[in-house]
Image (cartoon, helix red, strand yellow):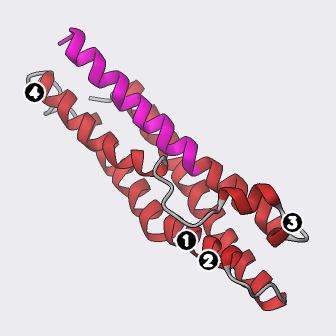
Amino acid sequence: MTGPLYDTVVALHVLAAAVGFGALGSTGAYAAAARRSPEPFSNPGVVRYFTPGRNWGERAILLVPLLGGALLALGHGRDVSAAWPWIGLAIWTAATAVASAVAWPAEREIQGYLAAPERGAKARASLAAAARRAERAVATTSLLFVAALVVMIWQPR
């Protein structure tokens, strides 16, 4: 099915994926900068990025399966019996699990270390460990994002 509503939902589906994974990618890049910086507590870009609070852009990945379900419904069930939507959902679920179980908690830890008054070697080591976890989690979610993108474009039957 095509039409203005379907096309709008497709655009929102793609936009949510791009915003969510773009924000996750930024977290990985800034986590790498924090880990590699000789003085992460004085790095204005790192401190600004990891200001305490939720990174709502990353949460856009949670909208993607909902919008995908809406697309299946708007398509009148044409693709419900195909393998690709379910493979994509499984990959997306894995990416969301890694983000919510590893990346987001590591990001909150980094925020806490940067906001805390303690700036010694122990704080630096703890910050580096949290940044490493965030980097690895973001790398994993990025690979899963690419896999889901391939499945959505290829649409294996």
Q: CA distance from mark 1 to mark 2?
A: 6 Å
Q: Which residue is mark 1?
A: 108
The circle drawn on residue 89 is: none
Say which amino acid is labelled 2.
Answer: Gly
Say which amino acid is labelled 1.
Answer: Arg
Disc 3: CA contacts within 10 A as few (<14), some (14-19) or many (>=20): some
Name the N-terminal-most of marks 4 and 1: 4
Q: Which residue is mark 3?
A: 37
Q: Residue furthest left?
A: 76
Q: Is residue 113 above or below residue 136?
A: below
Q: Which residue is mark 2?
A: 112
Q: Is residue 4 above or below residue 83?
A: above
Q: Is residue 7 left or right of residue 53?
A: left
Q: Nearer the viewer, mark 4 or mark 1?
A: 1
Res. 12 image quadrant: top left
Q: Position of residue 88 (x, y in %)?
A: 34, 41
Q: Which residue is mark 4?
A: 77
* Image point (39%, 62%), residue name: 97
Say which amino acid is labelled 4.
Answer: Gly
Quadrant of the image for the N terminus? top left
Residue 31 located within the stretch drawn in magenta: no
Q: CA distance from mark 3 to mark 1?
A: 19 Å
Q: CA distance from mark 4 to mark 1?
A: 40 Å
Disc 1: CA contacts within 10 A as few (<14), some (14-19) or many (>=20): some
Name the N-terminal-most of marks 3 and 1: 3
Q: How many marks?
A: 4
Name the N-terminal-most of marks 2 and 4: 4
